[in-house]
Amino acid sequence: MKVYDVIIAGATGMVGRKMIQVLEERKFPVGKLLPMASAHSVGKKVIFNGKEWTVQELNEENIKQSHAAIALFSAGGSVSKEFAPVCTKYGITVIDNSSAWRMDANVPLVVPEVNRKKIFSGSKIIANPNCSTIQMVVVLKPLHDHYKIKRVVVSTYQSVTGAGQKGHDQLMKEWNREKVENPKFPYQISFNAIPHIDEFLETGYTKEEMKMVNETRKIMGDNSIEVSPTCVRIPTVGGHSESVNIEFEKQFDLKDVREILSKAPGVVVQDKPTEKLYPMPVWAHDKDETFVGRIRRDESVKNGLNLWIVSDNIRKGAATNAVQIAEEWIKGA
Ligand SMILES: NC(=O)c1ccc[n+]([C@@H]2O[C@H](COP(=O)([O-])OP(=O)(O)OC[C@H]3O[C@@H](n4cnc5c(N)ncnc54)[C@H](OP(=O)(O)O)[C@@H]3O)[C@@H](O)[C@H]2O)c1
């Protein structure tokens, strides 16, 4: 069997560690694993397929010497901006988890269940969308194909793990009543809800919110879809939750909507409210699927639908989606 040498850029981080775990779980044909991170992590070990692999510094020399086929990046936007082109210079295909390349017109933005073909557009950099966008579009796409979406109003309830290791650690320290040095969030996150993720823009929206608007249109390949987002950080760890209100052009039948969603790839319908069955982060935690429930008609508008969508942001929102792209990439067009 053909094997591929794989760089993990950001191997010590929350997403990087999960990417290594997912590569192993899904039996991705890795030859050499090349974990890389900042200079301060050099020499740390990661375990993959029962073997120890030593973390190297992410720099041009190590990239050149790696002779890798693929690099999975999760080390932040500025690192991707600098080192993704270094990888492509040495013939390495990059799958990037940061926001650095997502809206570049020459870079495909891919969720395999939605737009797999874009992987083969000729770009050596392939972007992985924002976590909140990924879980929304896997559910929206099959509905859009049937009923054409006009407008989406989404409110997110996002896990602290979306802010990386430091976000997770802040919540744990607050719960343990330990002192938090350099807090990741602008306020305490325990017992709180903070309507502020990423930077504010002049319009009053945050960059996180605008990612949901622009990335949804790019992935779905339809700029006519209107998206009105509010992104909120809450003290959970298992995944992001979203209340999603959709207005369709065409009429729909709720029974058909359930049928369509139950057949959609990567989607699991959890919708028996009378039996207290609806998606929650504690159930979605460490799962690869996106869960949808509370499926009901919005009676205040023509052709309106309400959904509740939950998925593990570190898995489908980051690591799993990136590994799925790599799996499709090796299969070819
Ligand atoms: N968390 C999520 O839900 C999520 C979802 C989708 C996308 N992402 C994206 O994935 C990326 C990483 O997120 P994360 O949650 O894993 O953050 P994290 O836990 O803070 O990890 C950051 C990683 O980046 C490495 N790094 C930082 N500066 C570096 C540098 N100058 N050179 C090389 N490596 C460097 C760190 O290495 P050291 O340990 O050596 O500092 C660490 O491995 C971000 O771009 C984020 O936007 C995150």
Image (cartoon, rainbow, N blue to C red):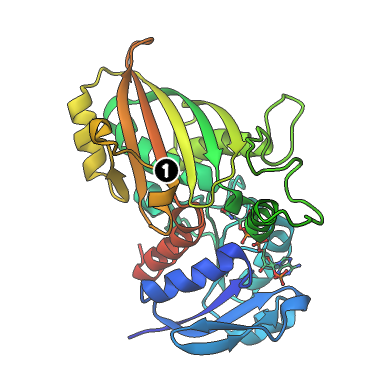
Q: In this view of the protein, which residue sits in the foreground, 155 or 36?
A: 155
Residue 244 higher or lower than 65, as above or below:
above
> Quick one: quadrant of the N terminus?
bottom left
Residue at 45% in and 30% down: 243
Say which amino acid is labelled 1: Val
Binning the other alpha carbons within 10 Å of mark 1 as few (below 14), some (14 to 19) or many (20 upward) gives many
Residue at 27% in and 32% down: 273
Task: Answer whether residue 141 is visible to the viewer in this image.
Answer: no
Residue 52, position in %: x, y? 54, 89
Side (left or right) of 100 relative to 149: right
Secondary structure under tag 1 reads strand
Q: In the orientation shown, which residue stands out farthest toward the front? A: 177
Residue 326, position in %: x, y? 44, 66
Q: In the orientation shown, which residue stands out farthest toward the right? A: 181
Q: Which residue is mark 1?
A: 310
Task: Answer whether residue 236 is visible to the viewer in this image.
Answer: yes
Q: In this view of the protein, which residue sits in the foreground, 237 or 23?
A: 237
Residue 97 lies in quadrant: bottom right
